[in-house]
Image: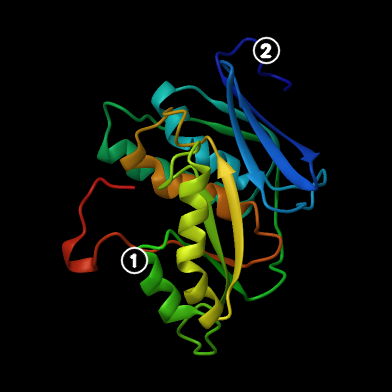
Amino acid sequence: MEGMENRDYLNLTVTQSEIDGKSRRLIRLTGGIEIFYEFDRIMPWSGDELFDGYVFAVLLYAMSKGKPLFVEGPLSHSAVRNIEELQLVWSRWKPKLYRKIEIIPERIVTRKPKSEIAIAAFSGGMDSTFTLLQNANSKDPRRYPVSTVLMVHGFDVDIKNYNGFEKLINRVKPLLEELKLALRTVRTNSAALGIADWEDSFALQIAGILHTMSGEFRYGLIGSSDPYEAMAFPYG
């Protein structure tokens, strides 16, 4: 944190713990904000863990505060570029709410992708189902070879509604089995905290969790809410 002592900034840290054979990651932000991700399995963790997703998840909140964000971990080169473009977009879309800020990671690294496989965010709705039908285990070079889906407890289903989330999983299981897709689940309080407008930030929050699996998957897909001819801006 050298050179940051006399500046008004936000600080982001991430730690992992294991409970009942599952991983729990805790994102801490200056001001007592704590976002947790509870995975359905043990997740690999090391000092080289990329912090790309954690920054995406809190980016609009940080921009709304207008303060530099110091990241106590590495960012990838691609994330640094994308964060710069995202900030440009949102600061132009909503200049009264979001301001471009300085993002200061411990270091910037380049990673070679491990595979070509993809994971897709899945809610059980029409848009995400269409994404699966187009891409599930596809060998078509125009498609993304989706092998796994991510379902998040705490976004479409309230974080405290365990029964509702279980019912949702049971409802979509036949489709996933038919398409031969594996299932990952994560429970988070990211949306419940309300630190950023949901309609602005939902895609960034989904992307944040998808990025926690970037060591296994090269691509993460999020279904579009609207077709290209009917898109609305600004929107997540």
SS class of the residue under badge 2? loop
Q: Is residue 161 left or right of residue 26?
A: left
Place of residue 18 in the rendered image (x, y in percent of width and height, measured from the top left): 80, 40
Q: Is residue 109 left or right of residue 69?
A: right
Q: Which residue is mark 2?
A: 5
Q: What type is the residue that disc 2 sits on? A: Glu
Place of residue 223 in the rendered image (x, y in percent of width and height, measured from the top left): 38, 64
Place of residue 184 in the rendered image (x, y in percent of width and height, measured from the top left): 61, 60
Q: What type is the residue that disc 1 sits on? A: Asp
**Residue at (56%, 15%) from the top-left corner?**
31
**Residue at (54%, 89%) from the top-left corner?**
139
SS class of the residue under badge 1? helix
Above or below — where is 194 with respect to 229? above
**Residue at (66%, 18%) from the top-left corner?**
4
Depth order, front residue of 139/136: 136
Tell us which disc is closer to us: 1 or 2.
1
